[in-house]
Image: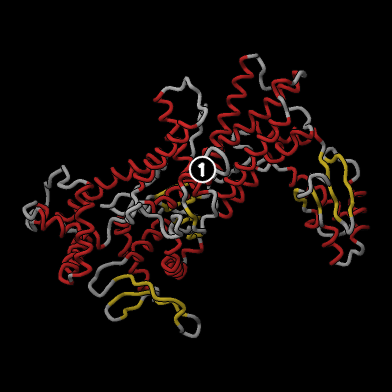
């Protein structure tokens, strides 16, 4: 990882404070919020006064004197009561940017391949099409896997399907009523089941809500569904074969919807994959006296030193022998810690599951998983409509994700038709543009918000080509590419970066922020930091381009430098958008 100007300056100032027999950490330098007064600022002299160093203004002057002439620093000004404002040499800025731009990861990557990060996101249920409630986990989780992988970690992502709960028993019983003669329901048949599924995803989407509603009102139906679920979990061959059909037809639809979003997973495991780990997990919990029997159920209680309950217990197995959602999650974590050897496991799951994960993680701590692995619930808020309530269709139903994507595409087509898009673009290319604009709309609208916050979804607003939107950023990338193409037609090509002039300084500093932005995004598991950087970078370029008439520049070396700066800006915008899962366009 390349060092930043802040890092280099902090080292210089740290040594100067040490020369005055003061702590090195006082030399920390930060970007100035008053660029007219300095590029950077060091406030350590004020902190030194609290340590008994005396007048901060005098201390600051001594620090400046201790530094003296430096190849990185143009000049330093001491301002009362003891601020040190620092101006960096123009050649140093362009030199650092040249280094950064020559690196394939813009200086952000590190050697972290020996640290495995597993990211659990998606969580769709078998027998259901994805709806708008799955949007955030897919978009945030995919962005995090891209960013962690870019940073240098070994990353493994898992869709973690909901394929092992009571809904499976509901589907089995529902299909039995409709097609009772299928071989799956004959206990005497144990193999050679049909390879073709007896149901489609459309069938499952009809059966499940009907059976779910019935089970809520009919105790006998609910009991039958629970019994079927238990038989499935215990390995009844016909039910296992039928369950595989349910999973396969569901995954095919899920891959279509995820594919439209440009989201992919390394693993397509489900709750069912935790089944082999449940028995050894429960045995270990019993052997270590972590779990206890309570009214016929097996639970993990959570108590303080005085024996008082600090939160509800984690129910592992009900009195009827059925395992619970928390059991499969703990068994999945058991696999990730013991078999997969993950050092970090992130769960990108709705914030309404916070209590659940607190229980699972507390049980994992009692098992000692925290000795080798850090596990976190990187939760998120809800997507709301303009009424402030969870986003719905116009009729009040839950909107399917596929339908939302189609709505976004239609809105993109309207915006494109109303814009000054190139007249020579074919219908096929226009459709590709519409798709990418639509996906950028959905993803950037989500990721620009700190993940734990709810946000109001406004499709018309988020698909605008101006403002803090995905389409705006696509437009800016396409605009820079257009500038570079026009330059090449008159043999004006990008060259070496020259010493940074005042017109280029703000843009150069913004480009140099990239490694720190990636670090903060990783540290907080929050892609909105990267979104903010990309939007600010696009704005800085727009401001720079308005002030600097590149094609009218008579000094050819200067023109080549400006084109190179434009090229670097375009590359960083494109790279950053790719980390958000957003594909860019050659022209718009």
Dividing the picture into quadrants, the one containing residue 289 is bottom left
Residue 373 visible? The answer is: no
Give neighbour class at mark 1: few <14, some 14-19, many 20+ (Cα, 10 Å): many
Q: Residue at x 88, y 46 (%)?
A: 76
Q: x and y percent of residue 60 in the render?
A: 89, 55
* Above or below 271: residue 37: above
Q: x and y percent of residue 259 in the render?
A: 37, 40
Dividing the picture into quadrants, the one containing residue 331 is bottom left
Q: Residue furthest bottom?
A: 306
Q: Residue furthest front?
A: 418
Residue under pointer 1: 580
Image quadrant in which the N terminus is located: top right
Q: Tag count in the figure?
A: 1
Q: How is the image coloured?
A: secondary structure
Q: x and y percent of residue 586 in the render?
A: 52, 27
Q: Residue at x 25, y 46 (%)?
A: 248
Relative side of 523 to 416, left or right: right
Dividing the picture into quadrants, the one containing residue 314 is bottom left
Secondary structure of the residue carrying numbered label 1: loop
* Above or below 331: residue 246: above
Residue 28 visible? The answer is: yes
Relative side of 27 to 238, left or right: right
* Above or below 198: residue 280: below
Relative side of 125 to 34, left or right: left
Q: x and y percent of residue 411 in the render?
A: 43, 39
Q: Residue at x 70, y 37 (%)?
A: 507
């Amino acid at each position: 990882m390349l060092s930043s100007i802040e890092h280099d300056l902090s080292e210089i100032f740290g040594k100067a404070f040490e020369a005055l027999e003061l702590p090195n950490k006082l030399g920390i330098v930060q970007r100035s919020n008053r660029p007219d007064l300095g590029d950077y600022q060091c406030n350590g002299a004020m902190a030194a006064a609290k340590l008994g160093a005396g007048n901060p203004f005098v201390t600051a002057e001594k620090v400046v004197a201790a530094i003296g002439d430096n190849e990185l620093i143009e000049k330093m000004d001491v301002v009362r009561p003891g601020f040190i404002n620092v101006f960096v040499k123009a050649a140093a800025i362009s030199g650092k940017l040249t280094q950064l731009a020559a690196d394939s990861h813009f200086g952000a990557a590190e050697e972290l391949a020996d640290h495995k990060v597993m990211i659990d996101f998606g969580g769709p249920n078998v027998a259901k099409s994805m709806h708008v409630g799955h949007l955030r986990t897919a978009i945030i989780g995919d962005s995090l896997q891209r960013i962690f992988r870019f940073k240098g970690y070994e990353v493994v992502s898992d869709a973690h399907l909901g394929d092992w709960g009571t809904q499976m028993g509901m589907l089995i019983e529902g299909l039995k009523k409709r097609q009772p003669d299928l071989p799956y329901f004959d206990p005497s048949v144990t193999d050679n089941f049909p390879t073709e599924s007896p149901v489609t995803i459309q069938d499952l989407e009809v059966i499940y809500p009907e059976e779910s509603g019935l089970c809520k009102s009919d105790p006998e139906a609910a009991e039958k569904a629970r019994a079927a679920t238990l038989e499935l979990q215990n390995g009844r061959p016909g039910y296992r074969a039928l369950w595989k059909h349910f999973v396969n037809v569901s995954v095919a639809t899920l891959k279509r919807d995820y594919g439209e979003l440009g989201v992919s997973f390394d693993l397509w495991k489900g709750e069912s994959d935790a089944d082999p780990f449940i028995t050894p997990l429960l045995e270990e919990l019993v052997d270590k006296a972590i779990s206890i029997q309570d009214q016929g159920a097996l639970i993990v209680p959570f108590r303080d030193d005085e024996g008082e309950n600090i939160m509800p217990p984690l129910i592992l197995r009900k009195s009827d022998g059925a395992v619970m959602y928390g059991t499969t999650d703990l068994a999945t974590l058991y696999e990730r810690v013991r078999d997969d050897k993950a050092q970090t496991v992130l769960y990108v799951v709705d914030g309404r599951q916070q209590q659940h994960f607190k229980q699972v993680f507390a049980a994992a701590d009692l098992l000692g998983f925290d000795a080798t692995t850090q596990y976190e619930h990187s939760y998120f808020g809800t997507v709301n409509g303009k009424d402030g309530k969870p986003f719905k269709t116009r009729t009040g139903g839950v909107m399917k994700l596929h339908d939302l994507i189609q709505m976004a595409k239609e809105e993109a087509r309207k915006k494109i038709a109303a814009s000054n898009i190139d007249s020579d673009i074919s219908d096929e290319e226009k459709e590709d543009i519409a798709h990418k604009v639509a996906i950028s709309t959905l993803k950037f609208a989500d990721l620009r918000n700190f993940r734990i916050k709810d946000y109001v979804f406004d499709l018309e607003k988020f698909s605008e080509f101006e403002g803090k939107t995905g389409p705006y950023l696509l437009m800016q990338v396409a605009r820079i590419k257009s500038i570079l193409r026009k330059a090449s037609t008159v043999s004006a090509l990008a060259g070496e970066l020259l010493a940074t002039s005042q017109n280029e300084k703000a843009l150069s500093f913004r480009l140099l922020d990239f490694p720190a932005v990636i670090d903060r995004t990783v540290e907080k598991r929050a892609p909105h930091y990267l979104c903010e950087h990309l939007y600010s970078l696009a704005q800085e370029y727009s401001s720079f381009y308005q002030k600097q008439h590149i094609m009218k520049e008579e000094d050819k070396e200067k023109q080549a430098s400006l084109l190179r700066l434009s090229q670097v800006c375009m590359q960083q915008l494109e790279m950053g958008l790719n980390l958000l899962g957003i594909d860019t366009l050659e022209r718009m």
